[in-house]
Image (cartoon, grey):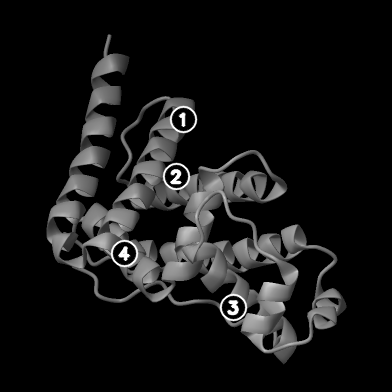
Amino acid sequence: MSKTAPSAPSQPRMAQGKRLLMDTATRLLARQSLQSTLALRELAREAGLNHNTFYRHFSSLEEMQAAIIEEFVSSLRSGLTEARQQIPPGQSVSHMVIGSVFDFARQNSDPFILAYRVWHGPPSESRDLVQKAMDQLCDDMFRDLQALGILPKLDEARLRRLLAIDIQQVFRLCIAFLESPRSRARLLDAGDELLKTLIAGAAVLQSP
C-alpha cells in the first residue's frame, strides 16, 4: 500500500497577498454550508489584509475560486500520473493509486473538499472547470493504464465511461476516508473491487 501522496509540481512564486487570499478562501469555503456565500470583507479580515488588496490579484471571487481549483487539479493530475508510473510489478494498481489519492486528500483536505463540493454544486464556471478536470483525469488514467497493459481490449468509448464512473466513486471514497481515516483499508478494498467489477462487467457485455 502506498503511503506517499502525489507530489505537487513546483509552482511559480506567488505574491504573498495572493497566496494568503487563496489559502484563506479555500479554508473558509471548505467549511461553509452549501447555501453560504463568501463575503469579500470576511475573506480579507481572515487573511489579515485590506479588502482592496483582493482586486490587485483577482477581478471576482469566482475568478479566485477558479484559480484555487486549477492549482489543485494541476497538483493532483501530475501526482497521480507519477504514482501510476512508479507501481512495482505485481502490486495492485487500484490499491496503490487510490492510496495515493487518499494521502493527497488528507494533506490537501480543504481544496479537495472545495473541489468536490463545487463539482456536485449548482451550475457555475467553477463547476465546469472541475468537470473539465475530471475529464482530464479520465484521459490520464486511460493513457497510463493502457500503457501498463492493464485495460482489456474493449471499446475505447466504453472504457472511458467506466473510468469516469470509477473516478467519481474514488472521490466519494476520499471524502469517506477524510471523515473516517481508520476505514482506509476497507475503502481501498471497495475502490479496488469497483474498478475490477466495472471492467469485468464491460467485458461480459461486449462478449459475442
Q: Which residue is mark 1?
A: 156
Mark 4 or mark 3, which has the lower sequence index? 3
Cα separation between marks 1 and 2: 9 Å
Considering depth in this image, is 7 or 44 the residue closer to the camera?
44
Q: Is residue 132 left or right of residue 87?
A: right
Check if mark 4's residue and mark 3's residue have beta carbons within 8 Å.
no
Mark 3 or mark 2, which has the lower sequence index? 3
In the rendered structure, find residue 195 and report the number of the disc placed on it. none
Label 3: which secondary element: helix
Q: Which part of the image, by quadrant, shows the C terminus?
A: top left
Cα separation between marks 1 and 3: 39 Å
Label 2: which secondary element: helix
Q: Which residue is mark 2?
A: 142
Q: Which residue is mark 3?
A: 23
Cα separation between marks 4 and 1: 27 Å
Q: Is residue 27 left or right of residue 123?
A: left
Between label 4 and label 3, give the one nearer the viewer: 3
Q: Amino acid type of disc 3?
A: Asp
Q: Amino acid type of disc 1?
A: Glu
Q: Which part of the image, by quadrant, shows the N terminus?
A: bottom left
Check if mark 1's residue and mark 2's residue have beta carbons within 8 Å.
yes
Mark 1 or mark 3, which has the lower sequence index? 3
Cα separation between marks 4 and 3: 21 Å
Q: Which residue is mark 4?
A: 102
Label 4: which secondary element: helix
Residue shown at 34%/43% (left/top)? 169
Between label 1 and label 3, give the one nearer the viewer: 3
